[in-house]
Amino acid sequence: MAISGRRKFDDDKVVKYETAEKDFEVEVSRTLNKWCVTVYQMPDRQILVQDFFPERWKALARAQDFLRLLNQRKKKEEEGLAGNRDDDDF
């Protein structure tokens, strides 16, 4: 199967991901001939991290990594609080 030199229609679309608590947003967009991954802290959309990639698939993978880490952070905080409560019983 021959591969066309044309881009797919959705290649330039901005992709946004939100954490489960909706306190962070991760966005993938086309910037300066590269793909930009930006992590925003909500609600004021303060930029925490920006990373640039030459290929879209790498940027999407990194965005999903950021999202997974942000969601795990919340779970670890809850586990830490639960562990501290057990120590207070003594």
Image: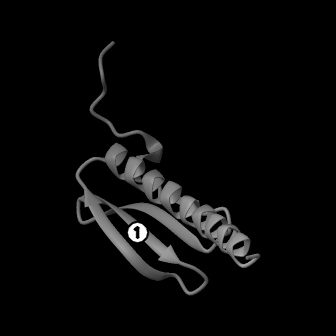
The figure's colour scheme reads one colour
Q: Is residue 24 left or right of residue 85?
A: left
- Residue 48 percent location from the top left of the image: 41, 78
Q: Quadrant of the image for the N terminus?
A: top left
- Residue 4 percent location from the top left of the image: 31, 27
Amino acid found under the numbered disc labelled 1: Thr
- Residue 50 percent location from the top left of the image: 33, 70
Question: 43 above or below 17?
Answer: below
Residue at x 52%, y 64% (from the top left corner): 70
Look at the numbered disc 1 and give the secondary structure of its residue.
strand
Disc 1: CA contacts within 10 A as few (<14), some (14-19) or many (>=20): many
Q: Which residue is mark 1?
A: 38
- Residue 74 percent location from the top left of the image: 61, 67
Q: Is residue 85 left or right of residue 58?
A: right
Q: Quadrant of residue 80?
A: bottom right
Task: List the single residue furthest toward the top.
Answer: 1
Depth check, front residue: 50 or 13: 50
Question: 61 above or below 42?
Answer: above
Q: Quadrant of the image for the C terminus?
A: bottom right
Residue at x 40%, y 61% (from the top left corner): 29
Q: Is residue 78 visible?
A: yes
